[in-house]
Image (cartoon, helix red, strand yellow):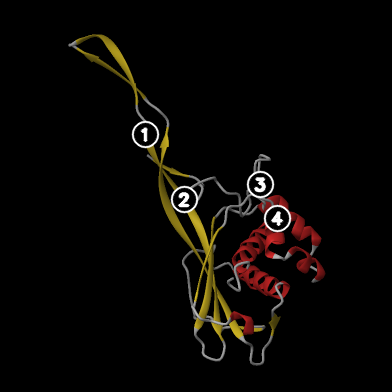
Amino acid sequence: MLRHRNAGLRGGRRPYGFGDTPAAPACRTLLMEDLEMAGLWFALRRRGICFGLLLLLMVTAGCSTIEVNQDYRLGTNFSRYHTYGWKVPASRHSADVRVNNPLLQERFYNAINQILAARGFTFSTRHPDFLVSYDYSISTRLESVPDGSPVRFGYSRYYPYGGVGFETVPVIQQYDVGTLAIDIYDSPTGGIIWRGTGSQIVTTPATPQESVASVFRMVSRILAQFPPH
């Protein structure tokens, strides 16, 4: 059996994101808690980030499940990196119109700039310490989960009574996952020194504001890992 619907990432709950609104107060974490843990909340306020956007982040994306991860070059002295610039991206094209949306790409670019600035890094076009690039992709995943218990009847000539049995039927769920990868390169050598990734269920945003909020949240969760501790 194949069903096309949103499902939680491996190991758990169905997340909200890109347009979904939490329907119950049992949501795991509000965005404000995430930003406070990353040391960003007051930094963003000081830099004039719209309070309405921050409120929308808390309300519409507070229950999103974003799986983040990082990898980095061992032995790198991250304390010497203070200024950054943008690495010219390689030409890339996706057949998915959601990925090729120039408005979405602009939101990723703006969110990365805002979060890096809030974390104390300064943008520079002249000899920056490190360079930044990003890549966004969407992939389809399948997951098998138990669903329903059809009743089956049986009778044996060796047993004078009928029997009733229950059997769990697996259901294949299909859903899309968006993955954002942010790469950081040492400017003098051009070698990559850090990669952070975040994955989240893709749904259709109800408004552009919800799309901005969801992008901002994903970027903040990824960059909360940089520099690595």
Q: Amino acid at mark 2?
A: Arg
Q: Secondary structure at mark 2?
A: loop
CB of mark 3 within 8 Å of CB of mark 1?
Answer: no
Location of residue 209 by image quarter: bottom right
Say the numbered circle drawn on residue 21: 3
Say the numbered circle drawn on residue 169: 1
Between residues 20 and 72, which one lies in front from this camera angle?
72
Q: Tell me how far mark 3 sits from mark 1, CA to CA.
A: 30 Å
Mark 4 is surrounded, within 10 Å at the Cα level, by few (under 14), some (14 to 19) or many (20 or more) other residues, namely few
| Residue occupied by mark 2 | 10
Residue at horizontal 35 percent and vertical 28 percent from the top:
167
Q: Tell me how far mark 4 sits from mark 2, CA to CA.
A: 23 Å
Residue 41 to residue 78: above or below: above
**Closer to viewer: mark 2 or mark 1:** 2
**Closer to viewer: mark 3 or mark 4:** 4
Q: Amino acid at mark 1?
A: Val
**Residue 177 shown left or right of residue 47 in the figure:** left
Q: Amino acid at mark 3?
A: Thr
Residue 99 to residue 21: above or below: below
Say the numbered circle drawn on residue 33: 4
Residue at horizontal 50 percent and vertical 57 percent from the top:
177
- Residue 140, position in %: x, y? 44, 56
CB of mark 4 within 8 Å of CB of mark 1?
Answer: no
Between residues 30 and 79, which one lies in front from this camera angle?
79
**Closer to viewer: mark 4 or mark 2:** 4
User: Who comes first in sequence, dot 4 or dot 2?
Assistant: 2
